[in-house]
Amino acid sequence: MARKDLGYLPRENPCAQCGRPIAAPDWTENGPRRISYLWHCRACDYKFEAVAFYDASQPNREALAA
């Protein structure tokens, strides 16, 4: 199920192409033990996805990568 959860969103993520900060992801999607973020840089028009994976053995821990 896709949703935009405003409670916790990564902020000021650098663009993967030009390095300029992006205020917030355009889209988030939760899956089993992962969250996907879709980023769009307005400065260079580059779009990319970042995925955070969670450790299955410790369900209440922070993301391993984003």
Image: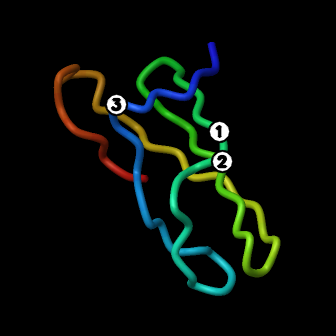
Which residue bears the numbered disc 2?
Answer: 38
Tell me if 50 is positioned left or right of 10 in this view: right
Looking at the picture, which amino acid does disc 3 mark? Answer: Gly
Q: Which residue is mark 1?
A: 27
Question: In which image quadrant can residue 46 be found?
Answer: bottom right
Q: Secondary structure at mark 3?
A: loop
Which image quadrant: the N terminus? top right
- 2 above or below 42? above
In this rendered view, identify the residue nearer to me: 16 or 3: 3
As drawn, which residue projects farthest toward the right?
45
Where residue 33 sits: x, y (%)? 41, 24
Above or below, 46 relative to 49? below
Q: Nearer the viewer, mark 2 or mark 3?
A: 3
- Look at the numbered discs 2 and 1 and tell me whether their residues touch, using CB distance below 8 Å: yes
| Residue at the image point whose x is 17% and y is 32% from the top | 61
Q: Earlier in the sequence, mark 2 or mark 1?
A: 1
Coordinates of residue 5 in the picture (x, y in percent):
46, 27
Label 1 crowding class (10 Å Cα cut-off): few <14, some 14-19, many 20+?
some
Most foreground residue, 57 or 54: 54
Tell me which residue sits at (22%, 20%) in the image. 59
Mark 3 or mark 1, which is nearer the start of the sequence?
A: 3
Residue at the image position 58 percent from the left and 22 percent from the top:
3
**Distance between the alpha carbons at the discs numbered 1 and 3:** 14 Å
Q: Amino acid at mark 1?
A: Trp
For label 2, the crowd category at 10 Å Cα-Cα, with few meaning under 14, some 14 to 19 and many 20 or more, is some
Query: How far, Cα to Cα, is label 2 from label 1?
Result: 5 Å
Q: Which residue is mark 3?
A: 7
In front: mark 1 or mark 3?
3
Helix, strand or loop at disc 1? strand
Q: Nearer the viewer, residue 51 or 21?
A: 21
Report x, y in % for residue 16. Answer: 62, 75
